[in-house]
Amino acid sequence: MKKTTKNIIYIALLLLIFALSYVVDIIAPYSMLVTVLRKGAVYALVAVSMNLLNGFTGLFSLGQAGFMLLGAYTYAIFTIPTAVRESVYYYYEGGIINFQMNMILAMLLAGVVAAIFAYLIGLPVLKLKSDYLAIATLGFAEIVRALAQWDGFGKITNGSNLLKKFPVLDNTTQYFLIVAICIAVIAMLIHSTYGRAFKAIRDDEIAAQAMGINLARHEQLSFVISAFFAGIGGALLAIFQTTVQANAFKSAMTYEILLIVVIGGIGSITGSILGSFLFIACSEWWLRFLDEPMFIGTFQVPLLRTGFRMVVFSVIIMIVVLFFRRGIMGDKEFSLDRIAKLFRKKAKGDKK
Amino acid sequence: MDFIAKYLPYLLAGISVGGQYALIAIGYTMVYGILRLINFAHADIFMVAGFIMVYASASMPIYLSIPLVIVLTVVLGFVVERVAYKPLRSAPRMSVMISAIGVSYLLQNTAWYVTGGLAKVYPTIPWISDTVTFMGCTTKRVTFITPVLTILLVVILVLLIKYTKIGIAMRAVSKDFETSQLMGIKINTVISMTFIIGSFLAAVGSLLYFSNYATVTPTIGAMPGLKAFVAAVFGGIGSIPGAVIGAFIIGICENFIKAAGLTTFSDAFTFALLIVVLIVKPNGIFGESTSEKV
Amino acid sequence: MRNVLSLKDVTMQFGGVVAVNNLSMDVNEGEIVSLIGPNGAGKTTVFNVITGVYEATNGRILFNEEVMLENYPKGKMKKLYKGENAGVYKKSVVKLPDKITKMGIARTFQNIRLFKSMTVFENVLVAMHLRRKSNVFTATFKLNMKEEKAMREKALELLCEVGLEDVKDELATSLPYGKQRRLEIARALATQPTLLLLDEPAAGMNPQETDELTAFIKHIRDKFNLTVLLIEHHMNLVMDISDRIYVIDFGKLISSGTPEVVQADQRVIDAYLGVTEDE
């Protein structure tokens, strides 16, 4: 295939996706599909940001929920309209912030705050290796969660109470647009000379250093950038949920995102995106029937009741983890060439 | 006297919870020592042990349900290793850790399904759950049993590892996985044994822990699990006495922070401590350092 | 002749084991110098000390007259130290490997360490990262196209130089052994060094390949104005190529000089053949 035709097909695909996201809002505004698309998009961004760190730089970090919390809180705190602050910060005399920021600026600020925290925590923590890094970042996320709930910060964070009534996005296309831009930036980074340096570190730290790559600086960079996008992802999650509470950002959230990355393929951006939509669709929608009692004639199908969906879902995940260890995409990316190749192989196989 | 009256309950609670963390921490530290794996599912095995007790005690007397809890928990630990970790023996370490997270997810969701997501009241075990008064402070008898039982079990375990054949094999495997395999040590037996011991101690820990806290929920394992892991790291992962000492320190510190009125931070403190320890002394108090050969 | 690399009293001690003991050596501009010795003599450790992978316990290393490393036994090592010349050096200057590479020392590895997920081409490309002028922002948003293009051209040029241009899009680890070694050299050259350290470049090669390698090392030395320090076991290659040779055994220097001098040295013969020390 020629490069130009390929680019045209890619652009057409992208436009098609956006068009679909637009149409969905019109024909089925309150459907499960809308929920899946929006939440899937948010998780896709967070999963890609985690993949940048775990998959491309080889740093096993489990602090994603912490950075998302920082992003979600930053966004919520600065965008609650001044008029309703009194009712939101009911227990803290309306809080101490008396202005409202623009949504987009607040989203960027959400990323920046997460990035600043990542920089500071990274200074000591990034000296640690593999599992130690994982457990230290996990600990960091728990500390952030405790701080956000602390009464002493109540005037800013509303303590352990909900933050709500902040502006939200009202159509799916907007979610897609923001997520697409962020993921595109991450993809461009990965394809730049810095991305190559990250992969070199992942493959062999000692050789990477011998090639003159400053480990500390590049790891820090990857960590901060990943946190930046996790922060934006957190802001989007806040928008999706319309309320924010620190308790939602437990380590279980990080584990879910990690599982998405694994299902999609560690080291594949498109894998993370696909993995995210599949994960959300399965957990929220496709397997929902498992939670409802079902009758075939007068026979009641056994086992089906609330909670069975998640059991089946976790079994599926275990199967993927054990038997399809490379995930959907492995470390490859989605491309027309690969699809064409696949078809050609099939065709060849059929002839034989 | 006032001082004692004020802080003694916290100290006792700290020692007791420290002992419970210690019993969980040993499972983490032994598995890490041999497989270099943070067994995230360990905390959930502890949780499942709690639920088994809830259901077992409903249909049979306590003196039967306690051994049953221990046996079933050990079987669970054994099965988890065989199903979720053994097939990944030659896979990168990250895959095994992810598998552990997957098992944890599965156990939690299954527990949620079985219980309908409701907290279950833990049965009162006679004698252990009785209240006693010590120097003017009222507490359950389990508070005093825990440290004694913990130390007793640890001493037995240490002797076991030091003098029995399987114990020597365990030490060999933790020093050098491949060489010990070449020396004819049955690696799978050793690993299974590690999980059996770890699960056994977690089951005992759960009996003590839940006697104190009274309710069991599907996610209750997460926090004590993480803290026990921190204790293991604190003491130098791979070292059993280290894990026990670490667990007691964490249990006591945590309760004194509660005494100071900073309950919100008792969890955060544990992790702050972890990060500080990792940075200042990455191999923990009793850990050994390793370096990569170029 | 200008001095490029100078080791003075370098000792590397791991716990109680002295891997390199009070080694002094010099490499001058344009020379090809070999470091030889029986297995386990500490040759690779010397490389690891020069390139900053290990922090020497005692001694000083100069690169182009600039202090690249200076250290003395500290902390626990103060008591444990078994090497010589403790107390001569009082400063502690330690540079990380990436800084040393940036100063102009590149190396290859004895146990080949290529980036396994990358193609041959990318392996060379990534080694050019350290000479970049772009920052993360300009690189991400493709504002450095000129530089990127130059990098790619240079990488291709280097691959042609080592004769790997036809396999440039294959995975580095899928190459046969000999080609992987050549790729390691290309990758090292991409960092634009003035001093090249080769750790057993001829390992696993047959005599014909070894001859080719001899010519090749001389060729790149001339083309890129390099100074070369190499570790090798193929004595034909060593004697053929070296201007001077250093021989170490048990971490200590036992002989040095031109190939003829070293070949005739009884201590070298003893070290290689092994003699029982009878008093």
Image (cartoon, grey):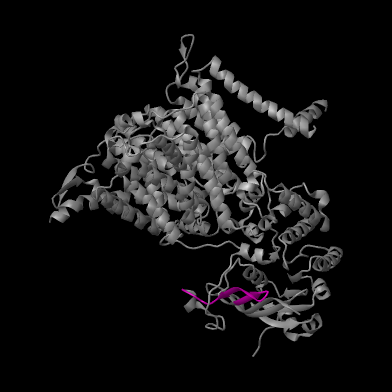
Please tell me whether residue B85 belongs to the stretch shown in magenta.
no
Question: Can residue B183 be seen in the rendering of this structure?
Answer: yes
Q: Is residue B193 left or right of residue B231?
A: right
The magenta segment is: C60-75
At x 24% / y 50%, what residue is drawn? Answer: B260
> Where C6 falls versus A313 (above or below)?
below
Within the image, what quadrant is residue A325 found in? top right
The spot of residue A202 in percent (x, y) is 61, 51
At x 52% / y 23%, what residue is drawn? Answer: A171
Q: Is residue A267 left or right of residue C171?
A: left
The spot of residue C149 in percent (x, y) is 75, 49
User: The N terminus of chain A is located in which quarter?
Assistant: top right
> Where C11 falls versus A29 (above or below)?
below
Q: Is residue A305 left or right of residue C261?
A: left
The spot of residue B192 in percent (x, y) is 49, 47
* The furthest residue to the top: A297
* The furthest residue to the bottom: C279
